[in-house]
Every structure is written in C-alpha cells, then in structure tokens.
Image: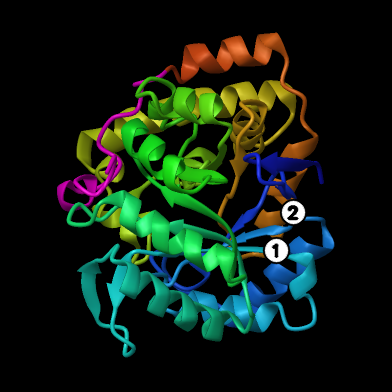
Amino acid sequence: MELRTLGRQGLTVSAQGLGCMGMSAFYGSTDTAESLATIDRALDLGVTLLDTAESYGPFINERLLGKALVGRRDQAVVATKTGIEFTDDGTLVGQNGRPDYIRRSLDRSLRHLNTDHVDLYYLHRVDPQVPVEESIGAMGELVDVGKVRHIGLSEAAPQTIRRAHSVHPLTAVQTEYSLFERGVENDGVLATLNELGIGLVAYSPLGRGFLTGAITSQEDFAADDYRRTDPRFQGENFGRNLAVVDEVRRIAADRNVTPSQLALAWVLHQGAVAIPGTKRRRYLEENIAAATITMTEQDLAAIDAAAPHGIVSGDRYAPELMRTLQG
C-alpha cells in the first residue's frame, strides 16, 4: 500500500484507509466477528489509517476498534472525533466544541479505544456557539501533553480552516469527496488546504455506496439504514443519480475494473487519502485493489464527462444536518 503524508507535521498514513463507522451504525445490520476480521485483514494488507468517532454508536465503534487493535496498536493510525456531545450513557446532547467537553470526551475515547493516545483527533463539526479558536486551542493543548499526536477538522469552510490553522497547525481536514460530491473543488476548501499544506481525507468516496453499482432500489436498504432518508436516494433524485452510476459502470467495464475501484482510483488520483467504509473482508480487498490502478488521461476525460461537478441530484444530507456543514 502506498503511503502518503498528511499535512506538514509528519503524519504518514496509507493512501487508502478504512472507515469503520458502518461496522456499528447507520448502515443496517452489523456482524462484530466479521468487522473484527475486516480490521485485522486491513492491517495485514498495509492499511494503517482507521477512522472512527465517539458518535458512531455512540461509543460502540470506538470500543470495537479498541478490541481489534489489541496487540496491533503500533500498526495503526487511529483517527477519532469530538464535538458532538453525548452523556456517558449515550444520550445525544448536541454540538459542543467547548474546551472542557473536548478534554472530557478525549479521555473517554482513550478508554474506549484502549490506548494512551489518538494519532489524529478531529473536531467532528464546528460548534457555531464556540469560536473555533477556542476548540482548536484545547485540542492543541492535548497535543502538548501527548494524548493526541495530530489534529484536524471535519467539514469546515475555508475561513474557518484558516482561523483554526492559525491557532495550531492542522494536519488534515476530512470532508465528503467523490465522483458524486466534488464541492470542495469549487468552494475554496481544496484551494485552502493546498495553500496551507493541510491533507485532505475523503470520506464517502463511494457516494455512500451508490458508486459501487450494487444499489438499484431503495429496497436494497435495511429498514434502519440511514440512506432511506438521504436526499440523494429519494424519489426522482434516485433515478437521476442511478443514471450517472450507469455511466461510471460503463467506463469501469472498459477498464476491466469494478465501479468501486474506478471511483476510488479517481479520488486517489486527486491526491486525497480515501477512507471507504466497509464491514466485510471481500469488499475491503476489492477496494484496496483500486490503489494499483493508474488513471490515464482518457479515463479522466471520460469520468469528467460522465460525472462533472454538480451532476449529482439532491443535497448531501437532510436539511437539519446540512446546517452543520461549512461551519
């Protein structure tokens, strides 16, 4: 697996990481044994960046990762997130970027992860009630005392990234980026990261599974699957987006690769670190093979024609969640 450096603080990670969220939440049924085996297999294949958050479960995903890493902690770059408050019994309180909560939630995450430090600690969403400088200041203090090695933001506007970076160097900004979601190319985020030397970590690089080509109907989702409420999987949006996937599938067939592999190879070609989520070893191995694909100018032109910026129909999230983006 190719290694890439995020930011200018020296954090080296696998070009393709593993998003662990779906192993515990939001995407239907889970299988703890298969999830543990998937994380183990990822490490065997050279994947180092493992992404979780205290909100995934809540807490269940961090505990799962902590269990998976017993005896292998030194092989992993563990990324988790703070800023969405839960009580210790898992009750959601809401966004909270206050320094006292950031400190308390990190200590709880360390217990759940069964580790003495987090390699990459993100502010999951910017709290509109707390200046980002205060949140980042607290996270920087955690770096100073050795509980955190590197810090970042998840979903933030260019001006917020600049303000945060002026307080403590950011190693990475995590945002949705895929053939379906290319907003960072035009909203100033990508340009800001390039200027400041901050790494881009792309979550949902497979368009929440749409770009696998395996989804053909809403009936493909379990009753408790988050995507049943995702605007891009609703009504006319679903049909329009499925037509885009058909074009991606056609290009992939011409290359003798799967749609997932083509979509991931494209994200990696842009210089991002991708963290596709999966809870099964067979999909993990398919995804990892994308790292060996070289994109040609012909491939890139065909993809740009099939999936240009703005082609996707529907917002990324329901309205109440859209308001938490670009903080």
Tell which residue pokes out farthest to the bottom in this image: 89
324 sits to left or right of 260: left
* Above or below: residue 261 compared with residue 48: above
228 sits to left or right of 108: left
Does residue 92 appear anywhere in the picture? yes
Residue 323 colored in magenta in the image: yes
Residue depicted at x 28% and y 84%: 87
Q: Which region of the structure is painted magenta?
A: 309-327
Residue, disc 1: 281
Name the main secondary structure of what is drawn in magenta: loop
How far apart are the two marked residues, 2 and 1, measured between alpha carbons? 6 Å
Residue, disc 2: 285
User: Looking at the picture, which amino acid does disc 2 mark?
Assistant: Glu
Residue 218 colored in magenta in the image: no
Residue depicted at x 31% and y 50%: 132
* Kind of element beneath mark 2: helix
Image-quadrant location for residue 76: bottom right
Residue depicted at x 48% and y 43%: 173
Work out which quarter of the rendered image holds the C terminus and state it: top left
